[in-house]
Amino acid sequence: MARNRFDIDETLETPFSMKHLMRAGVYIKRHKKRMIQSLFYSAISAISALFGPIFIAEGINTAVPNKDIGLLLLLTAGLALSIVLSIVFSVIRSRYMTIVGQEIIYDIRKDLFEHLQRLSFQYYDDRPHGKILTRVINYVNNVSDMLSNGIINFILETFNILIIAGFMLSLDWRLSLVVMAGIPLFLIVAMILKPAQRRAWQSVSNKGSNLNAYLHESLDGAKITQAFTREEENAGIYDRLNTAYRKSWMKAQYTSNLVWLSVDNISTWVIAAMYLVGVSFLGKSLEIGTMIAIASYAWRFWQPILSLSNLYNSFINTIAYLERIFEMLDEPVTVDDEPDASELPSISGDVTFEDVTFSYDGSVNVLEHFGLEVKAGQSIALVGPTGAGKTTVVNLISRFYNVTGGRVLVDGQDISKVTLRSLRSQMGIMLQDSFIFSGTIMDNIRYGRLDATDEEVMEAAKTVRAHGFISEFEDGYFTQVNERGSRLSQGQKQLIAFARTLLSDPKILVLDEATSAIDAKTERLVQEGLQALLHGRTSFIIAHRLSTIKNCDRILYIANKGIAESGSHQELLAQKGAYYHLYTAQIEE
């Protein structure tokens, strides 16, 4: 799919609307108590600071001309107290908002991660993992401050504007109107720039996501890069993506800067006009102390407007990130429990495919009218050309994908009608990619059953012949392995994954290329453990090494969107069909 590429810009399926902000309000409401407290302290801090110009004006107009030292000292003390109170309550407010911001980050990330855990394989097939990580980490960081400090600052700065306007009007309404005359012009400029700002920050969001996606891909493929000496070519690709991000960022900054530059210029013009008008009234109906106080308030009046313009820029940025976050949260969970899903009781292991059709992309069918009936305890091998649908068959049993048509039954129950947990908890699945988590070897094997004892873990490892190499490590089962098991060989990783699957004691066992990375000697040892594991369990085994599946009850040759041949090893050899030619070709090798 085209969007599963690092160099393809993401497109939003739904445009931004106020519903996004309403949804963001859910996270804010969870911390409304601290938000209200923070707003209260912010208001006290702001009001305390606003008394300063009044004390100064009174000192210039009254105390100094009358040489009233007592009044001057009192006004000075009042000025100092207003500054101290403003600072103290500002610090308290900052502490509260830091806590709220971090809690909002925690809440959004928690919701995102829980949703990602439930999304189907198809979602991850269609998207580079680096772009997913960008949304969970970078975008959440970017919106958290806006949803905490931003909201409070917006309310506070609006409150400041109104309070300052009241203080100015109480001193001189004529000069106050001159100071406020630039507001309509600022609003016009802001509305003109809004569409360009949103497009610019959406572009930054896209280019940053592309950059992170390629970085993630490059880190995963570092060994391949060096093996094929692709360092220079990859550096060129990264430079191109990095350049695109830098250009989009600079363009967005340029657009955003136009807003605060407009505010800065408008505020300078109106304050200059205020001085011109004030001089004409000076000595007549206006005292110099009052004009100085109005001038002080004028700068303070336009300061919150400048802050609001910066908040507006942040708001535009946040919109771009919120769109991405909520788009992910809105991604439908296509493989999920039905509203009336029931618990699947303990199963014996009968598996039936009834006229199953399946397509990954909705256009090309991988399976068509696929029918299969497997009795409990039978071992079924699936062979055939690459891409024929072998792994698809076992994925449908586990319900990693929903069938396009038909039904898959376990013990006669449609698996789409039972809970995923009750289904998958009774299945042991070892996929072709033997994923190893960072942690100890013991933890990795116990992942198959978290309540297993150390002895049970070791017994599972012995069964698959992993105990030998594990014991040779410096800390044995408690040896720390790196992410994706980089210090382990591919064969060792598969044996650990095999022990993990065995430990879960499944009723239905799925082995997808379970021995593909094990050498011939180790494979013979594993076969001994497999015989005990397979006994009494329904098993589906995908293997390209046909020597490993000769003893299976039935072998299915998957081709042409269905079962081309079916039978035991000897029966298929006697038919001298596709399986016969595949088997003899391997023997000749």
Image (cartoon, rainbow, N blue to C red):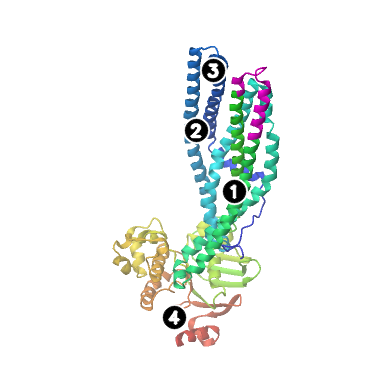
- Element at badge 2? helix
* Mark 1 surroundings within 10 Å by alpha-carbon count, few (fewer than 14), some (14 through 19), many (20 or more): some
Relative to 587, residue 269 above or below: above
Q: Is residue 121 magenta?
A: no
Task: Count all numbered tags in the image, as a single digit.
Answer: 4
Disc number for residue 547: 4
Q: CA distance from mark 3 to mark 4?
A: 100 Å
Disc number for residue 253: 1
Q: Are marks 2 and 3 in contact (CB under 8 Å)?
A: no
Residue at screen point 59% across, 20% down:
289
Relative to 105, residue 63 above or below: above
- Element at badge 1? helix
- The image shows residue 249 at horizontal and vertical percentages of 58, 52
Q: CA distance from mark 1 to mark 4?
A: 64 Å
Q: Earlier in the sequence, mark 1 or mark 4?
A: 1
Depth check: give the residue in front, 570 or 135: 135
Relative to 257, residue 471 above or below: below
Disc number for residue 93: 2
Q: Earlier in the sequence, mark 3 or mark 1?
A: 3
Q: Which span is picked out in magenta?
A: 268-291
Q: Are marks 3 and 4 in contact (CB under 8 Å)?
A: no
* Mark 4 surroundings within 10 Å by alpha-carbon count, few (fewer than 14), some (14 through 19), many (20 or more): few
Q: Earlier in the sequence, mark 1 or mark 2?
A: 2
- In the rendered structure, which amino acid carries the disc numbered 3? Gly
What residue is shown with label 3? 59
Q: Are marks 1 and 4 in contact (CB under 8 Å)?
A: no
Quarter of the figure with residue 563: bottom right
Depth check: give the residue in front, 220 or 71: 71
Q: CA distance from mark 3 to mark 1?
A: 44 Å
